Image (cartoon, grey):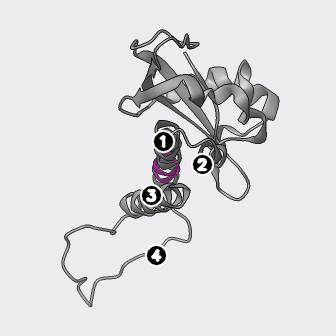
Amino acid sequence: MRNRLALLAALLLLLATALAVPGCGDAGGPANENMHVATPTSPPASQADAQATAQAKVTLRALFAAWEAKDAEACATYLPAYRQGPAWEFEGLDRVEFGAIKASPEQIKGYLTNGSGSATGVAREDVACFQANATFFYKPGYQGPATEGEAMRWHWFLERDDAGTWVVTDWGY
């Protein structure tokens, strides 16, 4: 199961990267041999931002897939060390459903000044934020930390490390 999730995450990352790079997947015909095509050494900031956002979103989707599969080991690959451990409480969880993932960059300033980002000292360009609802359903007789069946409007924060890897560092209202 873990290998399937890792393969799915890798494929999603590859797809997101291809979609974010200009020219990949476009239907344009062959370039005119007389036409000069500039090859920039680095992408423009907006393109780089879009690519980074797409990569962070792939990481978040992979965490959601691992969480839905109740695979604590796979979840751990998308989290920093301080977020791993018994807090997952999969034993009482029947299932969890996640809503659509929407970029929520307006939340980043608060994360950097008052949230976990203020403790880690991460740079603004290495933070992504998304909003996606989480709805928890529990096994009979189990009282979970969230109200069962209630879609909670959660924000998900990710940080990119020096190697370019995104991890989900914080989430909540």
- Please give left or right for residue 63 compared with residue 167 in the image: left
Disc 3/disc 4 C-alpha distance (Å): 31 Å
> Which one is earlier in the sequence, the residue at label 3 or at label 4?
3
Identified by mark 1, the residue type is Ala
Q: Residues within 10 Å of mark 3 (few under 14, many from 20)?
A: some
**For the stretch drawn in magenta, what is the main secondary structure?**
helix
> Which one is earlier in the sequence, the residue at label 1 or at label 2?
1
Percent position (x, y) of residue 140?
A: 46, 15
Report which residue position mark 3 lands on. Answer: 8
Range covered by the magenta-colored residues? 51-56
The secondary structure type at the circle numbered 2 is helix
Report which residue position mark 4 lands on. Answer: 39
- Please give left or right for residue 96 compared with residue 82 in the image: left
The secondary structure type at the circle numbered 3 is helix
Report which residue position mark 2 lands on. Answer: 74
Identified by mark 2, the residue type is Ala
Q: Are the two marked residues, 4 and 2, in contact with CB atoms closer than 8 angstroms? A: no
Quadrant, the C terminus:
top right
